[in-house]
Image (cartoon, rainbow, N blue to C red):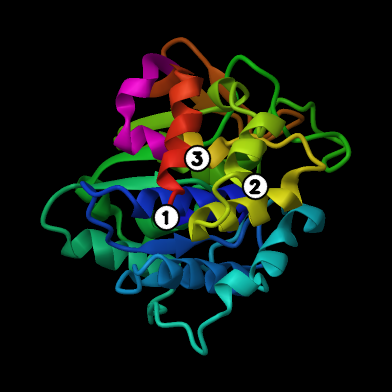
Amino acid sequence: MDHDGAIDDFLAMTLLMKMPNIEHLGVVVTPADCYIKSAVSVTRKILDLMGKNQIPVAESTARGVNPFPSSFRKDSLIIDNFPLLNEQEEIKTPLAREIGQEFTIKVLQEATDPVTLLVTGPLTTLATALDIAPEIENKIKEIVWMGGALNVSGNVSKEHAPEHDGSAEWNVYWDPFAAYRIWQSRIPVILCPLDVTNNVPLTPEFIRQLAKQRHYPLSDLAGLCYSLAIPQHYYCWDLVATVYLDCPEFYEIREEETTIITTGLSQGQSKIELGARKIKVMEKMDTEKFYDYLLTQWKS
């Protein structure tokens, strides 16, 4: 998994770690929607909480071109101080000696079978790794990526990007050149765009259901995290991408020809374009089963 340290990234990781049929090779944290030191710390503390402290965590040094607002990134600082995550005297989950892009190369080079990459932040760390070691492309089975907006508006607003037309989604906008780099590769991409995540908002009813099981540590963690998100229009972005790995039957997938815009007023737009790169796209999903899945997985 390669995530960028926001609320939904951390909670997506808890779901991933609960999937019994997946071999977890490591977690990379990309310094996008977070402050990197706190985001790495939270990642390791959550793995400790879940008894997954044999899984290494690597800190990426890759950088994008359009920074996330500090008001978004501060959540990682707050979560790092949750009492639930600070009951132990020290963190046991190992911090990889390699930086994130080098760790990605190492894991892929050592893998005996093709590896699926779950990316819930920008693609910058992976693009950097491919530039350093192009041969690792052949070791990647597919990328499941939360990113983009195809037939709906983006979530990059005028408030945070005054010269943008609003067509881009943040994970692409942070580094559209990285996304374009992946689009030039032969790696299969399964895209989880805003088109599908817009259908799974964080609702008052879901919060009420979650509150009923707050005596479970993961439900408590999710509730605490979501308390930071309540004032916002918040969606289950990264969780939608993650659940696909365990329950693909919840989703309808279609093939689209798409491209990435790297410059201009639409920088970071993911666009359907006839004759362009073919990818698979999550189009629809069973939202009721999705919400039930989250509640069930967090009962621990």
Return the x and y of residue 87 as percentages of the image width and height.
Answer: 55, 80
Return the x and y of residue 60 as percentages of the image width and height.
Answer: 50, 67
| Residue at the top extreme, as displayed | 274
Amino acid type of the residue that numbered disc 3 sits on in the rendered structure: Leu
- Please indicate, yes or no, whether residue 180 appears anywhere in the rendered image: no
Return the x and y of residue 204 as percentages of the image width and height.
Answer: 71, 32
**Does the magenta run of residues contain 31?**
no
Residue nearest the observer in this picture, 130 or 232: 232
Q: Which label was assigned to residue 216?
A: none
Q: Secondary structure at mark 2?
A: loop
**Which residue is the site of mark 1?**
300
Q: CA distance from mark 3 to mark 1?
A: 17 Å
Q: Residue at x 22, y 55 (%)?
A: 23
The image quarter containing residue 190 is: top left
**Which residue is the site of mark 3?**
239
Question: What is the quadrant of the N terminus in the image?
Answer: bottom left
Q: Residue at x 43, y 16 (%)?
A: 257
**Which residue is the site of mark 2?**
174
Q: Secondary structure at mark 1?
A: loop
Q: Secondary structure at mark 3?
A: helix
Q: Earlier in the sequence, mark 3 or mark 1?
A: 3
Label 1 or label 2, whichever lies nearer to me, is 1
Q: Residues within 10 Å of mark 3 (few under 14, many from 20)?
A: many
Question: What is the quadrant of the C terminus in the image?
Answer: bottom left
Residue nearest the observer in this picture, 48 or 129: 48
| Residue at the left extreme, as displayed | 112
Q: Earlier in the sequence, mark 1 or mark 2?
A: 2
Label 3 or label 1, whichever lies nearer to me, is 1
Q: Which residues are magenta?
A: 242-257
Q: CA distance from mark 1 to mark 2?
A: 34 Å
